[in-house]
Image (cartoon, rainbow, N blue to C red):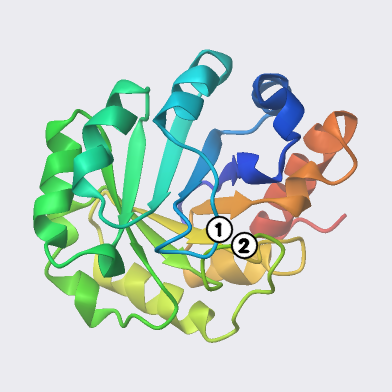
Amino acid sequence: MTHAVTIAPSILSGDFAALGGECRALAEAGADWVHVDVMDGHFVPNLTFGPQMCAALRPHIQGTMDVHLMIAPVDAYIGAFAQAGADVITAHHEAGPHIHRTLQAIRAAGCKAGLAVNPGTGIDAVAHLLDEVDLLCVMTVNPGFGGQSLIPAMLDKVRALRALIADRPIRLQVDGGVSLKTARSLAQAGADVMVAGSAVFQGGPEAYGRNIRALREAAQGVMA
């Protein structure tokens, strides 16, 4: 893989009583992006953040705010998340019948457009949308909760999507089960953005820098 690996810690794994401080600690620790998992309790079986939370976090995030909308419907909320300061907004292919329109609306709102696909969605669903996306997010677990193990078959999916992307300027993100044990295989398959929860947050803020370095080195095949 020729792309540098971007580490995008999921703030869902942070301390909810101190999320602003968590975002600052992540920046100091060398995180590239902050990934914000927005869940509605309908499209996925969990309820998390909304636009107001994203707006509150924005001043504390030095790099990219990567907003992952696990909600349905999506289109009515794109403007609010864009105004909240999202740099990337990712919508799920499965969340509505008009994903092409959704991706266009994200770009029209001034954000980079991400497209997420669940484990059960085939790569054929992506082929005709590549000109509308800046990021593809492969769910390597079923969305809704952190702490799940990577579904092994998703490695082949990542590999196939990397081949489909070819030389297009599209980032290939993996979300779910990213750890020191899986990072190298995911990077070799072609992933260049890794969303990580416990792999970054375990041990508290004093460990974030060490955890991020270890994850980056694991992805790059550097032996500890």
User: Is any atom of residue 59 visible in this view?
Assistant: yes
Between 176 and 97, the one nearer to me in the picture: 97
Q: Residue at x 34, y 49 (%)?
A: 90
- Which one is earlier in the sequence, the residue at label 1 or at label 2? 1
User: Is any atom of residue 29 visible in this view?
Assistant: no
Q: Position of residue 52 (x, y in %)?
A: 44, 25
How many neighbours does mark 2 have within 10 angstroms: few (below 14), some (14-19), or many (20 or more)?
A: some
Q: How far apart are marks 1 and 2 (CA)?
A: 7 Å
Between 145 and 6, the one nearer to me in the picture: 145
Identify the secondary structure beneath mark 2: loop
Q: Where is residue 161 in the image (x, y as percent from the top left)?
A: 34, 72
Q: Residue at x 59, y 64 (%)?
A: 176
Q: Residue at x 19, y 46 (%)?
A: 75
Q: CB atoms at circles 1 and 2 under 8 Å apart?
A: yes
Q: Where is residue 87 in the image (x, y as percent from the top left)?
A: 35, 30
Q: Is residue 19 above or below residue 170?
A: above
In this rendering, which labeled residue sits more in front, label 1 or label 2? 1
Q: Is residue 78 above or below residue 219?
A: above
Q: Which residue is drawn at 53% across and 86% down?
A: 153
Q: Residue 146 is drawn in which quadrant?
A: bottom right
| Residue to which mark 1 is pinned | 46
| Residue to which mark 2 is pinned | 145
Q: Residue 125 is drawn in which quadrant?
A: bottom left
Q: In this view, does 39 lie to the left or right of 24?
A: left
